[in-house]
Image (cartoon, grey):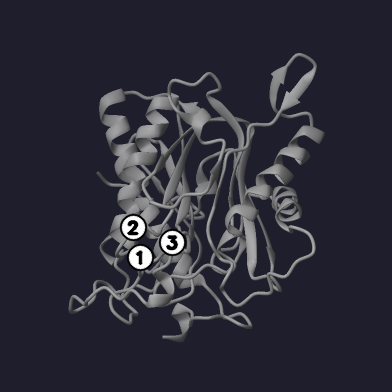
Amino acid sequence: MTARPGPANLITDVPGLRVGTAHDRHVKTGATVLLSDAPLTAGVNVMGGAPGSRETDLLAPDKTVEQVNALVLSGGSAFGLDAASGVADALRAQGRGFAVGDQRVPIVPGAILFDLINGGDKDWSENPYKRLGAQALDAAAADFALGSEGAGTGATTATLMGGLGSASLRLPSGHMVGALVAVNALGSAVVGQGPHFWAAPFEIGAEFGGLGPAPDFADVLTPPTKLSAHANTTIGIVATDAALSQAQCTRMATAAQDGLARALLPSHTPMDGDLVFAAATGARPLTDPLADTLYLGHAAATCMARAIARGVHAATPQPGDPLPCWCAI
């Protein structure tokens, strides 16, 4: 399969998608929103042992509501679930949502990561995440920044600051696939102390440094600060313009988890809440349902691995960071 990134190498290379980010540097946290003008068919897969999520049960293939109005990634642990409430309120004000009589109920699943002990001031008088969710929605656009932005603002890995990452691929079938991820892993994105990325075999060009694979395999480093329940989590979204059912979206989300395992060692641990949403705009029909869904899943995993490395690679130093950024090594 020969595939190349889209023009921006972002999830918004999938036509019709927009991403918005918002952050609070004082708190060292943020939120990220993915949406389109029309509802998205969506699925989800959870492989981490300590997830935090909102409205993921309704994404199961046997549930009634098959489409969502937006997907939200947020910092803040359980407090961050309120970011999706801010998005839902704003969408309702726009008249968007699932129609029930004369009411509109926006369907906004979300997932959170733990960034409460990352050096920021968490002594807030009012939960900031509803505001951050609304701000991220308001900022939604085709272009957005990577690294220390949105839900990746205060994210960390075992050895380096994490970040918000994205990548895309256009398949020979014409379908576009993209990934968006907030990297806050117990594991490491780099081999040993770095700077080589575990995801190097999947790099295209020099999108995260162009260093290639590490010359030697190194032991996995897991510092004691990461060995606490609910203190980590990598959360992401893969999206496509393919016409997929909810069951097919679920399968694509499942395949995308391979990208986490390729880019983060270890991944899917009992102390991570690793979760991947999948979304489909439905704009481009499948020409060969069996082959197309196979390659869509493979592309989703590849994009996710690259997006993870790009998020860590793009992180920039901020006051109070508990770890160095990749650029420092």
**In this figure, which residue is indicated by the disc labeled 2?**
269
Which residue is the extreme one toward the bottom?
Answer: 328
Please report contact status of discs 1 and 3: CB closer than 8 Å, yes or no: no
User: Looking at the picture, which amino acid does disc 1 mark?
Assistant: Gly
Which residue is the extreme one toward the front?
Answer: 229
Q: How many marks?
A: 3
Task: Report which quarter residue 103 is drawn in.
Answer: top right
Q: Is residue 91 left or right of residue 329?
A: right
Going from N to C along the chain, the mark reached first, 1 or 3, is: 1
**In this figure, which residue is indicated by the disc labeled 1?**
205
Please identify, in this view, whether the residue under mark 3 or under mark 2 is nearer the observer. Answer: 3
- Secondary structure under tag 3 reads loop
Task: Answer few, some or many: residues within 10 Å of disc 3's Cα (few below 14, many 20 plus, some between 14 and 19).
Answer: few
Task: Report which quarter residue 214 is drawn in.
Answer: bottom left
Please report contact status of discs 3 and 2: CB closer than 8 Å, yes or no: no
**In this figure, which residue is indicated by the disc labeled 3?**
229
- Secondary structure under tag 1 reads loop
CA distance separating discs 1 and 3: 37 Å
CA distance separating discs 1 and 2: 31 Å
Q: Is residue 138 left or right of residue 246?
A: right
